[in-house]
Image (spheres, rainbow, N blue to C red):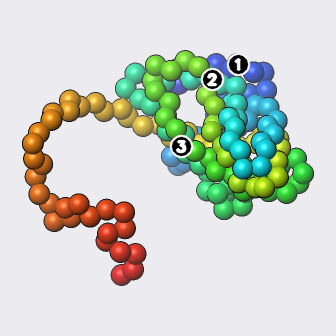
Amino acid sequence: MIMNVKKTNEDAVIPVFAHKTDSGFDLFTCEELTIEGRKKAIAKTGLIFEIPNGWGIQIKNKSGITMKGVPTTSGQNADITVYEGTIDMDYRGEVGIMIKNEEEQSITIPKHTKIAQGVLRKVYHCTFAEVKEVNETVRGEGGFGSTGNTL
């Protein structure tokens, strides 16, 4: 599959799969971004995707950033949250990555920082039918840790 990508910023980085077996492709910032302490911001990628019909892109965090933090211009890594998102096949705007600075102080993320990953997903649709009852299962209404967390 080939996906067309348009740069809206000359400093944008066309996505790559770091390894041929990777599920996600890397997304980079196209400009420096300063985020105040405990605030949210959108990191620009400078990219517009022409997603093929029947597909979507899920924006996911990167495990390295989750564990080690994101590099900053100060030389220190900072704790951030990268929020997941969905890019629909008919969206033709610039892709932005939603981020929250978890630090008390402001941070500046350098241009060309590997900030998130995109994962291609097949899109399925269904018709929803309202019913009075749903079938019973062994699990029933158990959720939110109802199966425990030890063997």
Q: Is residue 128 visible?
A: yes
SS category of the residue bearing label 3: loop
The residue at 63%/23% (across/down) is: 94
The image position of residue 16, as x and y in percent, is 63, 37
The residue at 21%/64% (across/down) is: 139
- Amino acid at dot 1: Thr
- Amino acid at dot 2: Glu
- Numbered mark located on residue 97 in the image: none
Query: Closest to the observer: 25 or 61?
Result: 61
Q: Splitting the image into 4 quarters, where does residue 46 fall?
A: top right
The residue at 36%/81% (across/down) is: 151
Q: Nearer the viewer, mark 1 or mark 3?
A: 3
Q: Is residue 19 visible?
A: no
Q: Are marks 3 and 2 in contact (CB under 8 Å)?
A: no
Q: Which residue is mark 3?
A: 84
Query: Closest to the observer: 39 or 23?
Result: 39
In this rendering, the answer to whether 31 lies above or below 146 is above
Q: Which residue is mark 1?
A: 8
Q: Are marks 1 and 2 in contact (CB under 8 Å)?
A: yes
Q: Earlier in the sequence, mark 3 or mark 2?
A: 3
How packed mark 1 is, by other alpha carbons closer than 10 Å (few <14, some 14-19, many 20 or more), is some
Query: Closest to the observer: 137 or 90?
Result: 137
Mark 1–mark 3 distance (CA, rounded to whole Å): 22 Å
The image position of residue 67, as x and y in percent, is 66, 62
Q: Which residue is mark 2?
A: 94
Q: Splitting the image into 4 quarters, where does residue 40 fall?
A: top right
The image position of residue 70, as x and y in percent, is 74, 52
